[in-house]
Amino acid sequence: MSTGDMLGISVSGVMAAQRALSTTGHNIANANSEGYSRQRITMEARPPSAVGRGGIGNGVVVNDVHRIYDDFVTGQVRSITALSKSMDINHDYTVQVDNMLADPKAGLAPAMQEFFSAVNGVANNPSSTSSRQVMLGSARSLTDRFAYLDERFEVIRSAANKNMKTVAVEINEVAYSIAETNKRIITASEVGGDPPNDLLDQRDHLLQQLSELIGVRVSYQSDGTMNVYIGNGQLLVVGQRASEIKVESTPADPQQMDIIFQGPDSSAYVTRFVTGGRLGGMLDFQRTILDRAQNELGRIAIGISKAFNDQHKLGMDVHSALGENFFTETEKLSPQVLPNKDNKGDAVVSATITSIDNLAPSEYELSYFEGTYRLIRRDDNTLIREFHDMPQDFSEEGFTLQLDKGSMENLDTFIIRPTRMGAKRIDVLTDDVNKIAAASPVRVEASIDNIGNGKIVMGKVLNTNTPSFTMQQGTMSPPFAIRFVDEEHFEILDNTGMPVPITRLALPEESKALEKKDGRHLLDEEKAGESFEMDDDYKRTGGIPAVETRIRYNQKTGINLFPSPNGVDPGFRVMITGEPVAGDTFRVEYNEDGTTDNQNIVALSMLQEEAVLEKGTSSFTDVYADLITRVGTKTHELEINKNAQKLLLNQIVAKRESISGVNMDEEAANLVRFQKLFQANAQIISVSQKMLDVLMAAFR
């Protein structure tokens, strides 16, 4: 071996050791750099020089410096990061809604309880002015609470919308940085020939940041650049070019945000395809929690105002006037129909709530194409109906749609929100305690001279204005008298103009065949039957007009007077029970001056637990309790999933670190090893120098 060969070999060893030491130092220096992947050099022997039958080695060469990197594990880190960040922000916003609704002081439940407790207070003492004043005050507190909760929903919505716009800006900045890094990677690869490890790490770190903002997928091109996909395949980054996304108000509603992908040649709405990251978490929160909760709150407000108003108008106030609306007619003020700003037609569409029983806390989309309307429930994307004209009654959904004016053009759309504005629109109309309709406008009385033990009981008032019967302040048309002809028959008389006094009516002479039996006065059945058939109504009733006669009565079961066998229905219910005898009379008339009567206010107090929502299966308190439960369950679910994803993320990050992270103990060992390698090769250089000196001295 020549000294020259020996020197060349040792120099290659020194250079390889120096490169190894530099790489080890680079690893140690970046031990805490986020996203850094440790690097290793690959050494291999130089091709030998042919000498005779064999070959003489020429030293070592550093083949490359490569990253210790697992693409699959890194992809898992990105995927789990997107899910984890989505659940984090979703949970943060959902907790706000949960705390607001379930608050024992600021929630709706205590305000509803306070209001109905005040209603019960008036029921216990209907003539008390102070009790009525408390009821009005608690009613205003209830409507204020609805308004407060609705305002809080809007504040949360506004904050989420603003946050989405901020996140969109961050996404565009990171996408641009990835495209620029792709460009630098190409340049570095062309100049150096080797993969630019630090730039690759930088690009992976940027991609990790992007996955915190939005869910992404990646692919690689042959030149080493990376493509980044979002949504359902939109290319956010293609090689050295980056597109962008925008967050803008939807064409139908300025309070709702749309995610728009802005490509080089076209744009597309991708809102429903965006998942993962902070942006996906906020969208999911608005879709599954915020919109539904605000719609549900509005439905409760509509239900309370409608049911309370309907019952209140069936009562009578202190001045003997029929009740008026206690709350605003929220069912008329709440429905929203929002036209898309891109509509070509000039149609104006409105919605009217027809049934709070069937009303759902949902949103709907109405679209038009070539003469056909389509109504879709947006919550579950269910087609409700296709139709060709309006108005249309969607009784199963609790509302109707009307085309007020104008006409539709192809692809015109409208958003229908029947309940969203309910909590905002409800208010108290009654401002006078004397206008609280606590009494029933109808009263019933039995004659003090009745011989039998029959009883008359006032039931529900269902309507104060039917086709054949009306009530006004102080009067009802007609008032009724009920007279028993015998134990098994009675008649209903029109007591207008000739009021029947509350004394026992005398029967016509031909119908007075009485006999004493078991200590009671009974009409002789045989003679009564004969006279019953023979007398005309006018003669038998003493000149009082008969509404209906010959009505059978069963002493065991009693009878509901209305509707009568012939269909007489004044809009209220009256029950007679017991054992009336012939000549016993009862009266049904307007309850004028009934200031101590509490029948209607009792009916109003019972609305708290009456099933008037969810197709007649749930009360206001039930629906609100379900809302709290649903939001609370979702909060708990998100918390569990968030913690699980965080644990899974920590595990996969630890896995990545075990593969790509810098191990200081390992690097310290490598430092010593490569230092010795360097020293050994340097020693060979020294020996080579001495051998060369001896050789040169021999020639002097």
Image: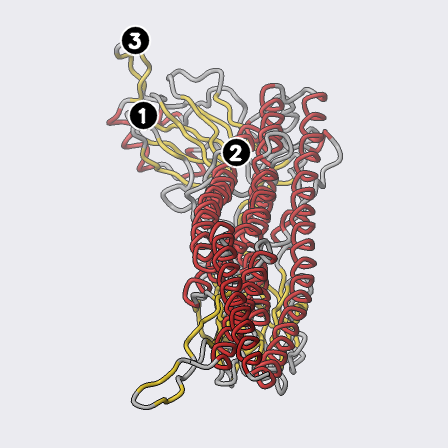
Q: Residue at x 61, y 36 (%)?
A: 107
Residue 263: quadrant of the picture = bottom right
Residue where numbered disc 3 is placed:
519
State how far apart marks 2 and 1 are (Cα): 41 Å
Q: What element carries label 3?
A: loop
Residue sticking out furthest to the left: 526
Mark 2 crowd level (few <14, some 14–19, many ≥20, 10 Å Cα): many
Q: What element carries label 1?
A: loop
Percent x, y of residue 551: 35, 37
Q: Can residue 227 be seen in this view?
A: no
> Which mark is drawn over residue 608?
2
Relative to 124, 383 lies left or right: left
The quarter in which the N terminus is drawn is bottom left
Percent x, y of residue 433: 72, 29
Mark 1 crowd level (few <14, some 14–19, many ≥20, 10 Å Cα): many
Q: What residue type is labelled 2?
A: Gln
State how far apart marks 2 and 3 are (Cα): 49 Å
